[in-house]
Amino acid sequence: MKKRTLRLIASLFIVACCQALAAQAGSVSQAQSPAAGVQFLGHASFHVFDGTSAIYIDPWFFEGPDRAKKPALRADQITDATLVALTHEHWDHLDKAGLATIMQKTNARIAAPEKVLAILQPLFGDRLIPLNPGQSVIEGRFTITAVPSGSIQGFLVRTPQGATLFFSGDEFSWASGAVEAVKAAGRSVDVAFLAVADSREFPATLESFRRFVTEIKPKLVVPMHEGTFTDYKGADHPAYEPIVAAIGGTYQVLDVGGILPLK
Ligand SMILES: [Zn+2]
C-alpha cells in the first residue's frame, strides 16, 4: 500500500472519529468544516465538495413521520450545487420537488441514467447529462464514473486529492458487475459508501457485503441507506465490522451531517 494512500485514509479516519465525538458533544460548527470533504446528508444522500464544486448524490429530503433519521439539509438550504448525480429512479433517490428547488436556486446540472432522464426531461431539459454505466462526467476537478451496482448503478468518484470513492446507491450485488467494473477502472477504492441492512432480516445483504468487500478491499467502509425509517431496524453494525477488519479495512459509521474531510 502506498504511503500517500495510507496517510489519506489515516487522516480521513482520524478526523471522522474526532467529528463523530464532537457531534455527540454537540460541538460541531461550520467553522470546523473542511475545505474539501464528503458530507453524509442521511439515507443515501451525500454532498461532495472542494470549495469550487459541490456535487449532490441522490439528494432526498423526505421528512415524513416515519423517517427516523431526518435529512441534514432542506432543499432550500442548498445554494452551492454545481452537479447533482442520480443513481436511479426510486422515490428515495429521485426527489423531484427537492430537485426543482435546487435547480431554481443554482446553475447545477443533473447527471443520471437514461431512465431517470426520461422522467426529468420535461422539467429540466438542457440541464441534463446522460450518465449510464461506463460513462463519466467531469465536474471541476472531480470525475464521476457510473458502474453497475445491483439492479441499478453506483458511482466511482475520483477526487482532486487522488482518492477513489465508491457510492453504491441502493443495495449492491457481488454478481451484478460492480466488482468487475471497479477492477476494470484500475483503481483501488479508498472509501466505499455501501447500502447495508439489518442482516438478521436480510442475510443475503450481509453475504453480498462480504463478497464485495473481499473482492474490492476498500480501506474504509461507511454504511448508509439504513435506519432511515421507524419501522425498520437499523443495520446490525457489529455483524459488518469484522468482515471489513478481515480485509484490513475500517468500518466507520457516520452521523447524519457528519463529514469525511478530503486531504
Ligand atoms: Zn433506496
Image (cartoon, rainbow, N blue to C red):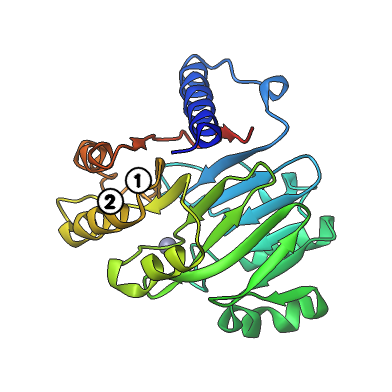
Picture quarter with the N terminus: top left
User: Which of the two labelled residues, at mark 1 and mark 2, occupies the earlier sequence position?
Assistant: 1
Q: Is the residue 150 above or below the residue 218 in the image?
A: below
Percent of width and height locating residue 250 = 35, 35
**Residue found at x 50% / y 42%:** 70
Image mark for residue 232: 2
Percent of width and height locating residue 80 = 79, 47
Tell me the amino acid under the disc marked 1: Gly
Which sits in the foreground, 45 or 213?
213
Secondary structure beneath label 1: loop
Q: Categorize mark 2 by other alpha carbons within 10 Å: few (<14), some (14-19), many (20+).
A: some
Tell me the amino acid under the disc marked 2: Tyr
Q: Pointer 1: what residue?
A: 227
Q: Is the residue 122 above or below the residue 63 in the image?
A: below
Instruction: Please give left or right for residue 247 compared with residue 13 in the image.
Output: left
Q: Quadrant of ligand 1?
A: bottom left
Answer yes or no: do the residues labelled 1 and 2 have beta carbons within 8 Å? yes
Percent of width and height locating residue 36 = 69, 36
Quadrant assignment, res 243: top left
From mark 1 to mark 2, how far is it between C-alphas?
A: 6 Å
Instruction: Please give left or right for residue 69 compared with residue 129 in the image.
Output: left
Q: Categorize mark 1 by other alpha carbons within 10 Å: few (<14), some (14-19), many (20+).
A: many
Which sits in the foreground, 2 or 33?
2
